[in-house]
Image (spheres, rainbow, N blue to C red):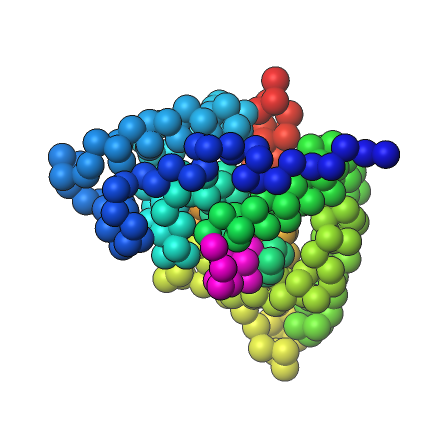
């Protein structure tokens, strides 16, 4: 018989119930990330410093590859977002910040984790909602372990050695189906967790998407002529790369401040042209995955 998992409240003990400020209105609990630092309450700075150290202990990747300034900005922004969901206590706010690292900066709107938005927006006491978030995040951790991620990396490498995935551009449905098959081949554990419907949503959402929101990957109408076939193939392959990044690292992966190399790599690669650029993305993605999965835990 396994030992029952401790609840979030038991884990945090009394510290979870300590308000970060003497007032209770969430809108006043923390200034905006770009607010005057001298105007922020002392407790605010103390908590940010505490979270910088905690996240470095919590995440080997953050400790090795994220500079302190970027991490502080991320903590500020995440705190402000947590307050919009009514989190004002130390424990729930800390949990929210941890989840932005564990599941990705946009975990609260990510279709891969629908329970997050549901619980954050639900009625009920703050600690009760945090307790449920903790339980769900533990389930993710149990099902998508570090070893599962490393096996996914090995499968990615094997597919690349065989020439990469085959992504059809015959129609948008064919492209989506091939991307979903690629996701399942690389990371079957996560594919089983999120389900085909969500993977298809990620694949379709990657069509024509670019991280700067100003320049979009070229897309070709399904009725394109034969002369446009090469453009259609290139667009399908770009779509697959973006979808896989979102599948592996969260649906905001290419704009996640803790993963700046992903979005930057895609922008640089797009300027190189399709063939060279896609090869650059695959190579850079392989190196990044190796750092995240192996170097960070060294």
* Residue 37 shows in this picture: yes
**Vertical side of 203 occupied by 211: above or below:** above
Q: Main secondary structure of the magenta part?
A: helix
* Residue 288 vs residue 141, the one in the foreground: 141
Q: Residue at x 46, y 33 (%)?
A: 14
**Is residue 122 highlighted in magenta?**
yes
Visible in this render: residue 269? no
Q: Position of residue 153 (x, y in %)?
A: 71, 36
Horizontal arrangement in the rendering, residue 128 relative to residue 24 (left or right)? right
Quarter residue 113 falls in: bottom right
Q: Report the residue at 53% width, 29% height from top.
A: 59
Q: Residue furthest top?
A: 298
64 left or right of 139 in image: left
- Choose between 52 and 257: the one closer to the eye: 52
Q: Residue at x 59, y 50 (%)?
A: 132
Can you say which quadrant of the picture contains the C terminus?
top right
**Residue most toward the front?**
14
Determine the residue positioned at 63% across, 45% down.
Answer: 135
In the displayed image of the protein, which residue is found farthest to the bottom?
A: 223
Of 17 and 163, nearer the camera is: 17
**Can you say whether 13 is above or below 233 in the image?**
above
Rendering coords of residue 154 (x, y %): 75, 34
Quadrant containing the N terminus is top right
Which range of residues does the magenta coloring cover?
Answer: 116-125
- Where residue 104 sits: x, y (%)? 52, 46
Q: Quadrant of residue 295?
A: top right
Q: Position of residue 293 (x, y in %)?
A: 63, 30
Judge left or right: residue 110 versus residue 293: left
- Residue 78: say if magenta: no
Q: Is residue 98 above or below residue 105?
A: above
């Amino acid at each position: 018989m396994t030992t029952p998992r401790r609840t979030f409240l038991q884990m945090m003990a009394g510290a979870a119930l300590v308000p970060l400020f003497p007032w209770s209105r969430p809108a006043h609990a923390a200034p905006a990330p770009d607010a005057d630092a001298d105007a922020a309450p002392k407790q605010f700075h103390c908590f940010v410093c505490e979270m910088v150290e905690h996240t470095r202990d919590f995440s080997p990747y953050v400790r090795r590859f994220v500079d302190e300034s970027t991490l502080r900005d991320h903590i500020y922004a995440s705190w402000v977002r947590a307050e919009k969901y009514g989190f004002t206590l130390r424990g729930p706010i800390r949990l929210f910040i941890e989840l932005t690292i564990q599941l990705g900066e946009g975990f609260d709107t990510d279709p891969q984790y629908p329970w997050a938005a549901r619980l954050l927006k639900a009625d009920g006491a703050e600690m009760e909602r945090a307790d449920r978030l903790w339980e769900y995040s533990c389930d993710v951790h149990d099902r998508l372990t570090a070893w599962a991620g490393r096996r996914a990396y090995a499968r990615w490498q094997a597919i690349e050695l065989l020439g990469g995935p085959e992504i059809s551009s015959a129609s948008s449905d064919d492209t989506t189906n091939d991307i979903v098959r690629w996701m399942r081949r690389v990371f079957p554990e996560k594919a089983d967790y999120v389900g085909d419907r969500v993977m298809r949503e990620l694949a379709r959402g990657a069509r024509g998407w670019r991280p700067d929101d100003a320049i979009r990957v070229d897309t070709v109408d399904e009725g394109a002529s034969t002369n446009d076939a090469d453009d259609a193939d290139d667009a399908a392959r770009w779509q697959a790369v973006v979808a896989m990044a979102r599948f592996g690292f969260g649906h905001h992966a290419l704009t996640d401040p803790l993963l700046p190399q992903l979005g930057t790599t895609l922008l640089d690669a797009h300027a190189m042209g399709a063939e060279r650029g896609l090869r650059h993305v695959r190579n850079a993605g392989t190196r990044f995955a190796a750092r995240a999965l192996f170097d960070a835990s060294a």
